[in-house]
Image (cartoon, rainbow, N blue to C red):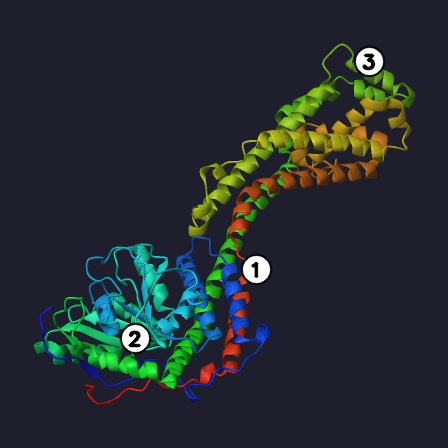
């Protein structure tokens, strides 16, 4: 640095968001208890924020997760501990860009080399907090910034807080030298933002060469939106450009509604052997902080102003989180509906297959015709009931049982249909999800096809249904002499006829389609069943068997759909997550107004006008 002139400042108090009705700055909010208290409401809000997730890959999800973390950090790091003790030392967080001279400025203000400058930047290192020895206990106990480990030695761990005491720093005031806001180290940038959110007062340090950079202004706008108290330091200003640069920066501050922020202009200069700026360069800034430290009312005004600004900013921020939670829920519902629609279509296809005669074609028809074509079954029906069992048994002696082949054909036909509809449904659901950003993120290739064990489960389901049909015949015919006298073969044969009946939509009042398809199959089955149970019983048996089959099909397909639905179930927020966040934010806002903080007004730290530009 080259030496040029003394420091200059612009008149004004730290910039804050507008407030009305200034109360006594030293007055503390009335104490309340229970969930209606401000700390209780904030704790409830923190719980609601922590319980809400944003796992689905939506455009708002990333910012929602980031903002939720930032709000939780501010609640833990600043709002709750500061509310617990409003008279704690005022924390000034010194932030700025790489090489702005923050550490040198802090060292110069406390008249000791407490924060390493220069060569350590921008490498990862722990933030440094310096305070008067009498205030050390407050910062050492960890209520403020509880997530940072306290240490009394320099550390390269960014999650450590290096505590240093400096007798030259007045009691009631502490400086925290934060990492660079534009550091090339991600952890440094994140920590700098977190620390700034825990400040009672933000001291932004920039230089004549970098005051127009975008990153600092983004943070300044964020500070303004939260009503934070702000002061600015323009460092390393060439003497010949002081007026021009200071005027331009003042214009920029005014454009961003930060025109009331005190602006301290520090000229280019040398540092002494300890790396400190000459006292004359920092005199105006040091005096301003000394007056602030010596005025309890002024400190209380800064604390209350920043505290209320942060509380007021919670409601819109939480509203955004609630909207994002609603979007997550709506997206999960939409993805679920795409899956359910695909598998509802599969169920309808199966039901249609039981109505349009397609299951009466091919192998089933051939085996049924073989089963009844020997004439044995019909001859037994025409003869006296007493001789039916013997004739039926004789008809199958010495040859493969047509009933077994028919049952196998029915099973195969149904399983083929089920595999087909399950494949179509999986492909449809997969395609539907792939077209949605949140769905695409949840997919894996196996979901495009039915489960590997679907054929086995489908076969087991059909066999269970067939056994259920036989049981139905036994129950419905329990008081029939026919069933009693012809025993197992009659039950099996009748059951097969019921299964064939299920494949006909008209329950044996054949349509032209069914006649053309089955070539009299339905008429043959009708004759069998009517001879045993009567016309109405035929309809009842077929209807019950069809209902049972469709119920089992639904269970099978539901299990397939669950491969998709389980993924959204794991991802979706609670149904009332958005409303829960809104209610919690509303309780905080109500408690804020009851506390008296919202009437803090524009009470500012006193500033001596003499020597101000």
**What label does residue 575 carry, if any?**
1
- Dot label at residue 169: 2
| Alpha carbon separation for disc pair 1 and 2 | 53 Å
Q: Residue 394 — which label?
A: 3
Residue 303 placement (x, y as % from top left): 40, 78
Q: 10 Å neighbourhood of mark 3: few (<14), some, or many (≥20)? A: few
Per the model, the C-alpha gap separating discs 1 and 3 is: 66 Å
Q: Cβ–Cβ below 8 Å for labels 1 and 2?
A: no
Circle number at residue 424: none
Where, quadrant-wise, is the N terminus in this rendering?
Answer: bottom left
Please identify the quarter of the rendering in which residue 291 is found.
Answer: bottom left
Residue 528 seen: yes
Dot 1: what SS? loop
Q: Is residue 251 visible?
A: no
Q: Give residue 493's position: percent from left, percent from top.
A: 78, 25
Compare residues 52 and 461 and report the one nearer the observer.
Answer: 52
Query: Around disc 2, counting alpha carbons within 10 Å, would you say few (fewer than 14), some (14 to 19), or many (20 or more)?
Result: many
Q: Quadrant of residue 102?
A: bottom left
Circles 1 and 3: CB atoms closer than 8 Å: no
């Amino acid at each position: 640095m080259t030496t040029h002139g003394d420091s200059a400042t612009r008149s004004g108090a730290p910039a804050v968001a507008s407030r009305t009705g200034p109360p006594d700055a030293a007055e503390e909010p009335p104490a309340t208890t229970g969930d209606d208290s401000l700390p209780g409401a904030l704790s409830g809000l923190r719980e609601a924020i922590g319980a809400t997730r944003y796992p689905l890959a939506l455009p708002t999800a990333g910012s929602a997760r980031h903002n939720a973390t930032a709000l939780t950090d501010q609640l833990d790091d600043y709002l709750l501990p500061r509310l617990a003790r409003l008279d704690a030392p005022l924390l000034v967080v010194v932030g700025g860009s790489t090489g702005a001279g923050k550490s040198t400025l802090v060292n110069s203000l406390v008249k000791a080399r407490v924060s390493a400058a220069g060569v350590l930047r921008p490498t990862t290192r722990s933030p440094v907090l310096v305070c008067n020895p009498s205030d050390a206990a407050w910062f050492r106990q960890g209520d403020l910034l509880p997530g940072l480990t306290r240490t009394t030695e320099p550390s390269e761990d960014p999650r450590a807080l290096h505590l240093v005491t400096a007798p030259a720093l007045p009691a009631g005031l502490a400086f925290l030298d934060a990492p660079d806001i534009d550091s090339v180290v991600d952890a440094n940038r994140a920590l700098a933002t977190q620390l700034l959110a825990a400040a009672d007062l933000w001291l932004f340090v920039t230089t004549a060469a970098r005051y127009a950079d975008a990153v600092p202004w983004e943070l300044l706008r964020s500070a303004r939106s939260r009503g934070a108290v702000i002061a600015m330091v323009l460092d390393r200003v060439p003497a010949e450009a002081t007026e021009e640069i200071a005027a331009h920066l003042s214009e920029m501050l005014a454009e961003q509604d930060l025109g009331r922020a005190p602006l301290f202009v520090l000229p280019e200069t040398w540092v002494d052997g300890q790396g400190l700026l000459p006292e004359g360069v920092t005199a105006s800034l040091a005096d301003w902080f000394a007056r602030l430290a010596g005025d309890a009312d002024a400190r209380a005004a800064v604390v209350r102003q920043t505290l209320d600004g942060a509380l007021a900013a919670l409601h819109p921020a939480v509203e955004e989180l609630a909207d994002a939670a609603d979007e997550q829920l709506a997206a999960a519902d939409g993805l679920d509906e795409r899956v359910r629609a695909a598998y509802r279509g599969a169920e309808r296809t199966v039901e249609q297959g039981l109505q349009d005669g397609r299951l009466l074609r091919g192998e089933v028809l051939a085996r049924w015709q073989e089963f009844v074509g020997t004439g044995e079954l019909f001859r037994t029906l025409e003869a006296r009931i007493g001789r039916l069992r013997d004739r039926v048994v004789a008809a199958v002696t010495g040859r493969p049982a047509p009933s077994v082949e028919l049952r196998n054909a029915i099973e195969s036909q149904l399983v083929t249909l089920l595999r087909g509809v399950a494949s179509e449904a999986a492909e449809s659901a997969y395609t539907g999800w792939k077209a949605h950003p949140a769905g695409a993120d949840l997919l894996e290739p196996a979901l495009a096809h039915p489960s590997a064990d679907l054929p086995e489960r489908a076969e087991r389901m059909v066999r269970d249904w067939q056994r259920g049909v036989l049981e139905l015949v036994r129950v419905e015919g329990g008081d029939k002499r026919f069933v009693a006298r012809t025993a197992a073969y009659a039950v099996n044969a009748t059951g097969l006829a019921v299964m064939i009946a299920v494949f006909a939509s008209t329950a044996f009042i054949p349509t032209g389609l069914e006649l053309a398809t089955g070539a009299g199959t339905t008429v043959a089955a009708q004759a069998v069943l009517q001879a045993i149970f009567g016309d109405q019983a035929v309809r009842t048996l077929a209807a019950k068997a069809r209902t049972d089959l469709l119920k089992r099909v639904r269970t099978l397909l539901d299990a397939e759909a669950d491969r998709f639905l389980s993924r959204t179930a794991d991802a979706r927020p609670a149904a009332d997550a958005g409303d829960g966040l809104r209610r919690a934010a509303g309780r905080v806002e109500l408690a804020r107004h009851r506390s008296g903080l919202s009437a803090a007004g524009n009470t500012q730290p006193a500033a001596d006008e003499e020597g101000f530009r």
